[in-house]
Image (cartoon, rainbow, N blue to C red):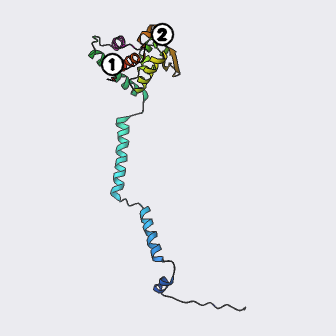
Amino acid sequence: MKDMEQLQINLTPHEKLAINNEFDLDKIIFDLDGQIELLSSQADNFDYLVSIASGVLCGALDILWVGDFNLERGRAIASDEIDDFVKKTAKMLGCEDDDLKSCVKFLEKKFPIPSDGNTPDFGGGLQHHLRDFAHHPTLVGLAFSLLTQFTYKSYGTDVKGNFLVVDVPEISKSFIGEDVPTKVLYMEQLHGFSIL
């Protein structure tokens, strides 16, 4: 046999090794245990039961009460509420009829706006209220109504949703103010806002 190197083994107690060693194994193990504990689930059986019960309850509510998602049903509900609002408003202002068509005609006669002359351009009938931006009872409607006062043009969409800019017809130009104060006054009266 070749020359064998001699191997020397020394046994050192742990206490002496930890003092001389630059790494504190106890501290490293304690830190790793803390990190593992933070990343581990602390849920017990009660937590799991509450989670399962809430999932089953939400699923049952969705199936039994909410039903399928349906835009047509939502539009019908919204349309009915808007129709009722128009009828109530017309009644408060003196309309004696109960049908929607008569109430809308009454309100348009009482509060005409320049873009009413562009009804055929925006799809005609009651739908022009949705497609003509000056009819919207929001700040957007207020802005487009003011824009119509200064540009003599109506803004909205056609029946396909394409943006339209059309001239206000001669018959409706009488609802456009002559100077800035009357333009603002016409616009604010039509939208029910008061600047005073």
Location of residue 72 with respect to 51 vertically, above or below: above
Q: Which amino acid does label 2 sit on?
A: Pro
Q: What element carries label 2?
A: loop
| Within-10-Å neighbours for mark 1: few <14, some 14–19, many 20+ | some
Q: In which quarter of the image is residue 142?
A: top left
Task: Please check the rendered image and state whether residue 109 is part of the magenta-colored stretch, yes or no.
Answer: yes
Q: Give the range drawn in magenta.
A: 98-113
Nearest the viewer among 36 and 154 is 154
Question: Looking at the image, which residue is at 27% across and 15% down?
Answer: 91
Residue 89, percent from left and from top: 30, 18
Q: Disc number at residue 33?
A: none
Residue placed under numbered mark 2 in the picture: 169
Q: Is residue 1 left or right of residue 54?
A: right
Q: What residue type is labelled 1?
A: Val
Question: Looking at the image, which residue is at 35% across and 18% down?
Answer: 189
Residue placed under numbered mark 1 in the picture: 86
- Which residue ends up furthest to the top in the rendered image? 171
Residue 122, percent from left and from top: 48, 16
Question: Looking at the image, which residue is at 48% across and 82% down?
Answer: 18
Q: In this view, does 136 lie to the left or right of 162?
A: left
Location of residue 87 with respect to 23 vertically, above or below: above
Residue 128, percent from left and from top: 44, 17
Q: Is mark 1 on a helix, strand or loop?
A: helix
